[in-house]
Image (tube, rainbow, N blue to C red):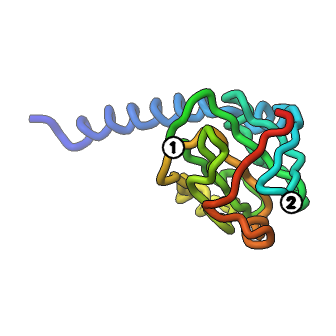
Amino acid sequence: MTTRTQVLIPIFIAAVIIGIVGLMTLPSEIKLKSVEFPMGTIKVDDIPLQVMIADTEPRRIRGLMFEDQLPYDQGMIFVFEESGLYSLWMLNMQFSIDMIWFDQDGKVVHIEKDVPPCKTPLEITTCQSIVPNAKAVYILEVTSGFVDQNNITTDSVLSIISI
């Protein structure tokens, strides 16, 4: 007959191994901090913005992590090769942001306002992904309050000047 200890020891060992492998596959903060972004210019309606361009997987993973608050005339634009349901989360963010998803024609398909950062250990463990309700090709992250200050709505349009 198998004892409780004989059952629990292999389960414990498997959990430890899975945990170690999981930690080893996470990108290190040093790697994330060293990611550099090309700069570009866009307009949302008639509002010009200087943007960091996140157009590769390492840049998208890094996002605005570790960045200080952005001025209202700056942001980050995530650029994807094809239309899809792309989610974002606020891990290692330092400030709240507004997020705007755009389709391939530059039309707003989803807006999230005043999304708070996940900074404390408890917040990080419960940090949720923000999932849009429509497919997009671009996602713009800007300082919280940008959407309200500039009257951005689902009727707003993204114009790419240089990215």
Binning the other alpha carbons within 10 Å of mark 1 as few (below 14), some (14 to 19) or many (20 upward) gives some
Q: Quadrant of residue 70?
A: bottom right
**Which labelled disc corresponds to residue 69?**
2
- Looking at the image, residue 37 sits to the left or right of residue 140; the answer is right
* Secondary structure under the numbered disc 2 in the rendered image: loop
Front position in the image: 114 or 133: 133
Quick one: label 2, few (<14), some, or many (20+) residues within 10 Å? some
Determine contact: label 1, label 2, CB under 8 Å: no
Residue name at image x 61 percent, y 61 percent: 154
Disc 1 or disc 2, which is closer to the eye? 1
Residue 15: x and y in percent read 41, 37
Judge from the rendering whether residue 85 lies leftward or rightward of residue 117; answer left or right.
left
* Horizontal and vertical percent position of residue 27: 67, 32
Q: Which numbered circle lies on residue 123?
A: none
Q: Residue at x 75, y 36 (%)?
A: 54
Question: Which residue corresponds to mark 1?
Answer: 135
Q: Nearer the viewer, residue 50 or 20?
A: 50
What residue sits 54% from the left and 52% below the top?
A: 129
Residue 73, quarter of the rendered image: bottom right
Q: Position of residue 152 (x, y in %)?
A: 71, 64
Toward the viewer: 136 or 160? 160
Q: Amino acid at mark 2?
A: Gln
